């Protein structure tokens, strides 16, 4: 099991460079380091730790159907216009979307021409590097400890896996000796409070909840309690929202405003949980929630064999919100940090 974060003292400096993809931190899935840098080239990654390798293998298996479809494009002996057309179709089928597909193809054509590559296999290697470059802005770490408590507001539509992701994140934070307080502000969905309570009991953490209480009031009480009790993290589970339900999106904005009244520096993170199976609809959700709340990070769930995976390329091109975690199953170890090169290799096989 990997450490998902590393506590920092409140006085610690906030200069947090992203670890290179071949660094030990990247291989271990550490959450520390959040400043974005874009390297000129893509270094060859060092061999990952055994635990991380098991995660990579599971990710490759989950994206195997998409990877097979794209890899089949490079089975010929020459690079011609028919290959580019087939690749365009394969990328669109992977949920990459039109803007990202056009960007990748234009960059690929230019790099193939400049390098003088003539074989499809070499062309595929260039595509892996190009996709990695596109995804790099999404590779950022969640930092815990600069504020005490660090207040994390979590949003998402019903069914995306929001509450389950909060439970998994709580477990890893607790394993790293961070004190966590949960806020059951999802007061509209039946059994949501009970579901979060189960995670609280399982992880031996405290929870603030009210039967039928106002979500904003629950959030305010939780942040106030977190400050009073000296908690490291307050995770606020908000109600599921569809971006088309404007009155409910206004309720989310209200929750954020009320949290700021409890702590004028909070929320320190606003995360959106999206279902990797929803394709281009996920991009629509990211844009709508970002416009309403100002997202700081994403958790992409359910990349477990049916999701096509290319939607991360679409997000990177159209609304590059950092992806803190991706999930490929229901087990605790199935939620891991996002690595651009690992994902590009898994998607393109």
Image (tube, helix red, strand yellow):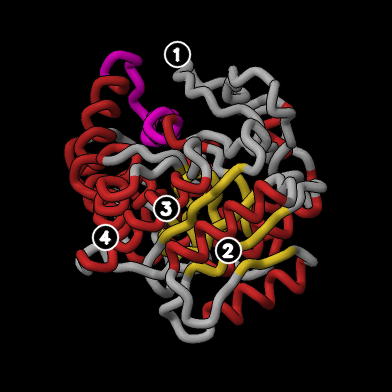
- Residue on which disc 3 sits: 258
- Alpha-carbon neighbours of circle 4 within 10 Å: few (<14), some, or many (≥20)? few
Distance (Cα) linking label 4 and label 2? 19 Å
Q: Is residue 218 left or right of residue 44?
A: left
Looking at the image, tell me whether mark 4 or mark 3 is earlier in sequence order.
4
Q: Indicate whether 32 appears above or below 343.
A: above
Task: Quickly name the residue at label 2.
Answer: 183
Tell me if residue 118 is in the magenta stretch.
Answer: yes
Q: Which residues are magenta?
A: 113-136
Q: Nearer the viewer, residue 347 or 119?
A: 347
Q: Mark 1 and 3 residues: CB-CB less than 8 Å, in contact? A: no
Q: Residue furthest bottom?
A: 190
> In front: mark 1 or mark 2?
2
Alpha carbon of mark 4 to alpha carbon of mark 1: how far?
Answer: 42 Å
Q: Earlier in the sequence, mark 1 or mark 3?
A: 1
Residue positioned 59% across, 72% down in the render: 209
Instruction: Determine whether, in the image, residue 288 is placed left or right of residue 190.
Output: left
x and y, in percent, of residue 78 in the image: 30, 35
Say which of marks 4 and 1 sits in front: 4
Q: In this view of the protein, can residue 241 be seen by the observer? A: yes
Callout 4–callout 2 Cβ contact below 8 Å: no
Residue under the image location 74 percent in, 28 percent down = 9
At label 2, counting other C-alpha atoms closer than 10 Å, the crowd grade (few under 14, some 14-19, many 20 or more) is many
Q: Secondary structure at mark 1?
A: loop
**Callout 4: SS:** helix
Q: Taken as a whole, is the magenta stretch helix, strand or loop? A: helix
Q: CA distance from mark 1 to mark 2?
A: 43 Å
Alpha-carbon neighbours of circle 1 within 10 Å: few (<14), some, or many (≥20)? Answer: few
Task: Please identify, in this view, whether the residue under mark 1 or under mark 3 is nearer the observer.
Answer: 3
Q: Assign a secondary structure to mark 2.
A: strand
Residue at which label 1 appears: 40
- Find disc 4 in the rendering and name its residue: 250
């Amino acid at each position: 099991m990997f450490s998902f974060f590393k506590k920092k003292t409140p006085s610690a400096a906030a200069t947090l460079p992203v670890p290179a993809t071949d660094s030990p931190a990247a291989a271990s899935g550490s959450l520390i380091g959040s400043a974005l840098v874009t390297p000129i080239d893509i270094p060859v990654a060092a061999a990952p730790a055994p635990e991380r390798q098991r995660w990579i293998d599971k990710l490759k298996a989950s994206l195997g159907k998409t990877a097979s479809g794209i890899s089949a494009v490079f089975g010929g002996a020459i690079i011609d216009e028919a290959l580019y057309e087939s690749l365009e179709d394969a990328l669109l089928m992977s949920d990459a979307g039109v803007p990202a597909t056009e960007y990748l193809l234009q960059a690929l054509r230019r790099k193939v021409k400049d390098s003088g590559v003539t074989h499809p296999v070499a062309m595929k290697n260039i595509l892996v590097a190009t996709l990695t470059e596109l995804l790099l802005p999404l590779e950022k770490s969640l930092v815990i400890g600069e504020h005490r408590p660090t207040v994390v507001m979590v949003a998402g539509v019903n069914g995306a896996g929001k509450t389950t992701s909060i439970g998994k994140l709580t477990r890893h934070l607790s394993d790293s000796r961070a004190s966590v307080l949960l806020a059951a502000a999802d007061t509209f969905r039946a059994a949501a409070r009970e579901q979060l309570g189960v995670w609280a009991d399982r992880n031996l953490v405290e929870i603030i909840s009210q039967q039928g209480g106002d979500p904003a009031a629950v959030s305010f009480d939780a942040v106030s309690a977190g400050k009073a009790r000296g908690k490291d993290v307050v995770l606020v589970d908000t109600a599921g929202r569809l971006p088309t339900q404007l009155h409910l999106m206004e309720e989310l904005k209200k929750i954020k405003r009320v949290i700021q009244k409890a702590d004028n520096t909070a929320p320190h993170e606003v995360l959106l949980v999206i279902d990797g199976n929803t394709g281009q609809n996920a991009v629509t959700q990211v844009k709508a929630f970002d416009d309403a709340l100002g997202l700081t990070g994403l958790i992409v769930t359910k990349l477990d064999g049916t999701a096509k995976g290319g939607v991360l390329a679409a997000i990177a091109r159209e609304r590059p919100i950092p992806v803190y975690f991706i999930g490929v199953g229901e087990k605790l170890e199935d939620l891991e940090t996002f690595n651009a090169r690992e994902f590009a290799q898994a998607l393109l096989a």
